Image (cartoon, grey):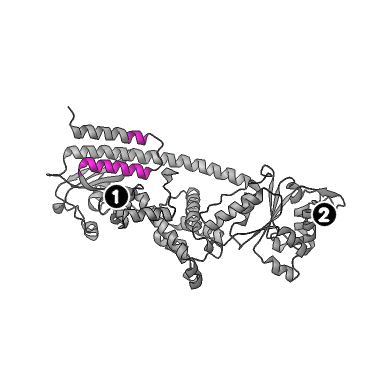
Amino acid sequence: MLSKIDVTKFHTLIEINSLINSNYESVHNLLLQIMESATKLSEAEASCLMLMDKDKQELYFEVALGSKATEVKKYTVKLGEGIAGWVALHNKSLIINDLANDKRHLSNIGEEINYKSKTMMAVPMRIKDKCIGILEVINKISEPGFSQEDLEWLEIFANQATLAVVNAKHIEEANSEIQLLQNQLNTDHGYHTIITKSPAILEKLEMIERVAKTDSSVLLLGESGVGKELFAEQIHLRSKRSKATFIRVNCAALPEGLLESELFGHVKGAFTNAVSNRQGRFEMADNGTIFLDEIGDLPLSLQAKILRVIQERKFEKVGSDSTVSVNVRIIAATNKDLEEQVEKGQFRSDLYYRLNVLPIYIPPLRQRLEDIPELAHFFLGNFMRETKKQFSGFSQDALQVMLSYSWPGNVRELQNCIERACVIGKNKWIGPEDLFLKSGEMQEEEAMDRNLKIAINVFKGSFIRKVLEENDWNQTEAARALAIQRTYLSRLVKELNIINPKEQ
């Protein structure tokens, strides 16, 4: 007859197996649950699950439980080093009830975090007889120590953890393929995703929702790289023209002679090499939307034709006397001061006033710090798929550097920065050294003072979210790890709008 503890163990195994075979959201949370069960049923004080980094030939802490869980996770263990390293190297389980007299035991980590290990069990996690990680339980609560039966049960839990990792890898690969396909579909249509948590940008999106319902011209203002094109896309996608064509034109990319033909088309023989009739961008955008980027660089000679299209919805192709009528909504964008250009005679005042019916200013990245971590993680996910590399995220030092940098190139510069970091990064976490951001380009003191409160809140929110994730969103455990009262943590979670993804 099974004892009460054996029945509990079997019920625990059945429960975990059910989770493994279900569509669970987070492998980390599942591994955490497996380790919590293994620790409890082994009657141990602490435990950890370590995974193998093949490139570095070392073990890192994926899950750690116990009073020193947070401190221990910053360490790694070389293959062959200590008990865990020995088990990983020899692919054999160990049960040791007298660690003080075992030569394989390295006490340096315990000494640094002020934790003494007396007894220990360590078993390998295997895929096709190859060790991919280690399960360790430490300090049996009851005497005389861990038994052979305890070891056998821990090996069963190790098999479950391995199965969870394998399943998660398959799910991750499948999701990556799906995401890649979705990205390709988005690219084919030419549309992008706006990633934001900034109140300033959320306010702009609300404005765009209202603006999109009209057919009036829109002028998007803001520095280079803030993402004006993405907002133009959103206006089109939320409008009644969304099923029609969205045409992009960079007015600064072509010389004046070619730009006129590009915009309005030409007829055969209009100029040298005009060997056939050509449809222009305005004609292509009929019943849809045309986005004129860098409108401030549009030559004066073409500004009159653009004004006529806005007013009369008519134009003539280059070399033709025939009038073409179109039904097009115009969205323009510039990083220049058009009022100043009007004063200098470099931009037509009548065109400016017609474009400026609905002006929308997109703030630079340095004024919406809440978006930096969100965009950085979004870009990192994209580039990990492209480079076939895996990172756990950004270190807190890296996040601090990103929040204090002025980002003169805005979102475009951040994207390039994350791509570079993903290519050259060698560690589990992207660090400041991978970002290559020059300290001389950090925000000036006045700007830093202005954004200090926002930066602190962004950093606090990111740090607290990370600790909550490590503790499976258990606020009591997270508060203990943060060394604060649970009620204070609960208030911070509410104030910083930290949302548990399981509850969304």
Q: Residues within 10 Å of mark 1 (few under 14, many from 20)?
A: many
Instruction: Identify the residue position indicated by label 1 in the image.
Output: 64
Disc 1 versus disc 2: nearer the observer: 1
> In this view of the protein, can residue 294 be seen by the observer?
yes
Q: Residues within 10 Å of mark 2 (few under 14, many from 20)?
A: many
Q: Which residues are magenta?
A: 16-43
* Element at label 1: strand
Type of the residue with mark 1: Ala
Earlier-in-chain disc, 1 versus 2: 1
Relative horizontal placement of residue 214, taking residue 389 as reference (left or right)? right
| Mark count | 2
**Quadrant in the picture for the N terminus:** top left
Instruction: Where is residue 371? Give x, y as percent.
Output: 50, 57
Q: Which mark is residue 318?
A: 2
> In this view of the protein, can residue 58 be seen by the observer?
no
Type of the residue with mark 2: Val
Q: Nearer the viewer, residue 48 or 372?
A: 372
Instruction: Where is residue 79? Give x, y as percent.
Output: 28, 51
Residue 149 sits in quarter: top left
Relative horizontal placement of residue 246, taking residue 170 as reference (left or right)? right
Residue 453 sits in quarter: bottom left
Q: Residue at x 43, y 55 (%)?
A: 496
Q: Find the residue positioned furthest to the top.
A: 1
In the image, is residue 166 above or below residue 299?
Answer: above
Magenta region includes residue 100: no
Q: Main secondary structure of the magenta part?
A: helix
**Quadrant in the picture for the C terminus:** top left
Instruction: Where is residue 245? Give x, y as percent.
Output: 69, 45
Mark 1–mark 2 CB contact (< 8 Å) = no
In the image, is residue 430 above or below residue 135?
Answer: below
Relative horizontal placement of residue 288, taking residue 77 as reference (left or right)? right
Q: Nearer the viewer, residue 155 or 200?
A: 200
